[in-house]
Image (cartoon, rainbow, N blue to C red):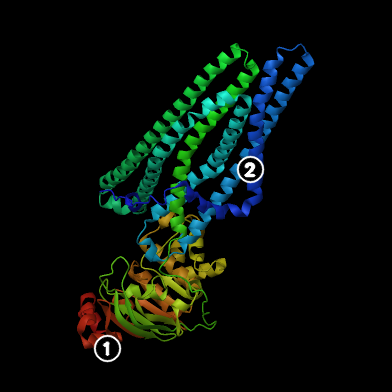
Amino acid sequence: MARAPKSANEDRAGSRKVGSLRALLPFMRPYRLLLLAALVALTITASLSLILPLAVRRVVDGFQTEAVQLLDGYFTAAFGIAAALALGTGLRYYLVTRLGERVVADIRKAVFDRTIGMSPAFFENIMTGEVLSRITTDTTLILSVIGSSVSIALRNLLILIGGLAMLLITSAKLTGLVLLIVPAILVPILVLGRRLRALSRENQDWIAASSGNASEALLSVQAVQANTHEMANRAAFAEVTEKSFQVARRRITVRALMTVIIIFLVFAGVVGVLWIGARDVRADVMTVGALVQFVIYAVMVAGAVAALSEIWGELQRAAGATERLTELLTAEDSVRDPANPVPLPVDFSGKVEFDDIDFRYPTRPQQAALDKVSLTVQPGETVALVGPSGAGKTTILQLILRFYDPASGAVRLDGIDVRTMRRDDFRRRIALVPQEPVIFADTARENIRFGRPSATDAEIEAAAKSAAAFEFLSALPDGLDTYVGERGVMLSGGQKQRIAIARAILRDAPLLLLDEATSALDAESERAVQTAFESMRTGRTTLIVAHRLATVKKADRILVFDEGRIVAEGTHDELVAAGGLYARLARLQFTDGQQAA
């Protein structure tokens, strides 16, 4: 069943207005000169458009004069105005389009900069695909507005105002008749425009939901295919996409209806006024040239009104897109850096303290992930965290990295509460090997270099050797410079994990966090990596989360977790001798002979 986008069901009557586009002003302020130049070019082209009918009137009335030179002058002036109009329009297009591209590029960077720093709690409530949809689809809509629609709207607004003034000058009588139809035009704009705003927002929400659905399925394509879930995923995506289309169809219908009504009213009025004007010409009340001038201005005014009604729909859609992007830019993160951060000591030793920590994940507030947990890891100590799945082991690492903040208690590094420091300050002193290694769409060398961008090739190769990764990487077509594909699709699970381990080794941080770091390795590779870890742990604090107890037997201390609490503590031999949960886990994993060892 398709998941309805939340915002499509909320009442946003107060915010679904073109006024939402004001949020774009901060992005346009740095380019005031470019904006001013575009407005000047726009004003000039609109003025030239209004002057052109005057030249046409002179030409038409000039046919009745015998002064050939005067007639030639009128034609020359008309050509000159047309040439200036063409040049001005080209300049306006260049300036406005350049401004639009620049502003939208800045918006995309701002949204990405904002979201890349958000804590994991933020992404528990929004799909990554939806964020990507806002960065791409919504910014494309804004580009069409800044780079085209706003310019055209302002130009047509100037033509509308100037055209009405020139109509009044040309014939007050006919102008009065034209103005009678204006109220009839405004009614559908106001009534249908409100409906169009709501449909535009809903349409964008369903497009984002469609993008999120596709992103989730494609990023897990192997799991989808292995479980023969293709048909179900196709059906789910088709359902969301179809809902998006249905909303789009309703939006198009409303906009088309509004366009039909407005254009009919405008041109029906022009025809009626032209009929009356033709009678005035026959009665010698006005000249043929004056009537032609009035008709041209009337057509320009009618075209401007029709264009404005079209652009109004675009502005409605862009307002919805701006609203959605603003939500990302103004979203409150539950984890924030302090205004006046405390610096981490330069000689950071890696001491870790948990003081009476209580923590619940935002999406599971009824279940305690950690319940009144206190622990201290001394500098240079290796501590293993073991226990059943969901016992709270990985949560310990996430709180050290301050991906989340505890509900109560404090996490301290070298005696300093992590909430009082800049996150990037203390994270630079931590190396993490996650449970699910992240491999980027780049070469193997650059994936390892991700741990320390300033590292040399020799250092990268040394780290690969320490992680037992150099041999298989050298066997790839281009060695360490082989492109490994999106999410490391060309590599096995164990190979990905060894690259992640090499990345952590290269980082050479005082605090090392290993979350099931060897779970995907074969016995031979695990033994080689364990040897590397043993040398790597020297002089640095290490926390190891593991289900395979063979990897933690040499730890200085082992903490046994169960249901968010520490239920036992000691060395491997002490815990086995004491019985309890650890002893049961050990019996499941070791034979009697291994257990005795």
| Residue of label 1 | 574
User: Which residue occupies the foreground of this view, 149 or 289?
Assistant: 289
Q: Give SS at disc 1.
A: helix
Expressed as whole percent of the image width and height from the top left, the position of residue 303 reads 53, 29
What number is the disc on residue 172?
none
> Does any portion of residue 266 appear in the rendered image?
yes
On the image, which quarter does residue 300 sit in? top right
On the image, which quarter does residue 161 sit in? top right
Q: Give the residue type at disc 2.
A: Leu
Q: Give the residue type at disc 1.
A: Glu
Expressed as whole percent of the image width and height from the top left, the position of residue 514 reads 39, 74
| Residue of label 2 | 39
User: Of tags 1 and 2, which is closer to the observer?
Assistant: 2
Mark sitting earlier along the chain (1/2): 2
Please indicate whether residue 172 sits to the left or right of residue 565 in the image.
right
Q: In the picture shown, does residue 314 fall above or below 8?
A: above
Q: In the picture shown, does residue 198 fall above or below 450?
A: above
Please indicate whether residue 113 sits to the left or right of residue 85 in the image.
left
Q: CA distance from mark 1 to mark 2?
A: 80 Å
Q: Give SS at disc 2.
A: helix
* Residue lying at 56% horizontally and 26% vertically, measured from the top left: 175
